[in-house]
Amino acid sequence: MMGHGIIAWIIIGVIAGWLTGKLMKGSGFGFLMDMVVGVVGALIGGFISSHLGLGGIGQHGLIMSIVIAVIGAVILTWIVRLVTGGRKANL
């Protein structure tokens, strides 16, 4: 299931979290929470991509894994903002 090692997952999480903070036009959640959002986003993105027949996040190279993770993290951030009414969540 997980084709990337733990270091790659951390790198993917950091990059995806940071990119999501930039894409979602808001301040990020801080370095650690951006990383968590990125890793959780990778799981969400991997789930979605595997159910669309595109393969899971661990079945792609680093760049495609980051793209999938960012998509998942954007979805996660959108849901969090929807639930919290757009205010910054205290995660």
Image (tube, rainbow, N blue to C red):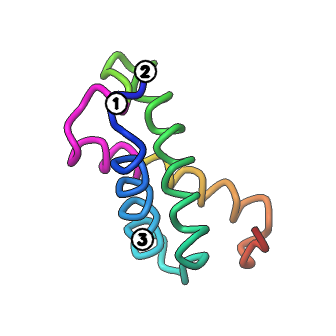
Density class for disc 1 (Cα within 10 Å; few <14, some 14-19, many ≥20) is some
Q: Earlier in the sequence, mark 1 or mark 3?
A: 3
- Quarter location, residue 4: top left
Q: Are marks 2 and 1 in contact (CB under 8 Å)?
A: yes
**Secondary structure under badge 1?**
helix
- Which residue is pictured at 51% across the width and 62% down the height? 35
Q: Position of residue 56 (x, y in %)?
A: 38, 25
Mark 3, residue position: 18
Magenta-colored span: 57-70
Q: Kindly identify which residue carries mark 2.
A: 1
Residue sitting at x 60%, y 52%: 76
How far across and how far down the image is residue 80, in percent? 70, 59
Secondary structure under the numbered disc 3 in the rendered image: helix
Q: What residue appears at the point 37 percent right and 68 percent down from the top-left corner?
A: 19
| Residue type at numbered disc 1 | Gly
Residue 54 location, x and y as percent?
30, 22
Q: Give the mark nearer the N terminus: 2 vs 1.
A: 2
Q: Which mark is nearer the camera, 3 or 2?
A: 2
Q: Give the crowd class for mark 3: few <14, some 14-19, many >=20 residues within 10 Å.
A: many
> CA gap, disc 3 to disc 2?
24 Å
Q: Amino acid under label 2?
A: Met
Disc 3 marks a residue whose amino acid type is: Trp
The answer to whether 91 appears left or right of 23 in the picture is: right
The residue wearing badge 1 is 58
Q: Which of pointers 1 and 3 indicates the residue nearer the eye?
A: 1
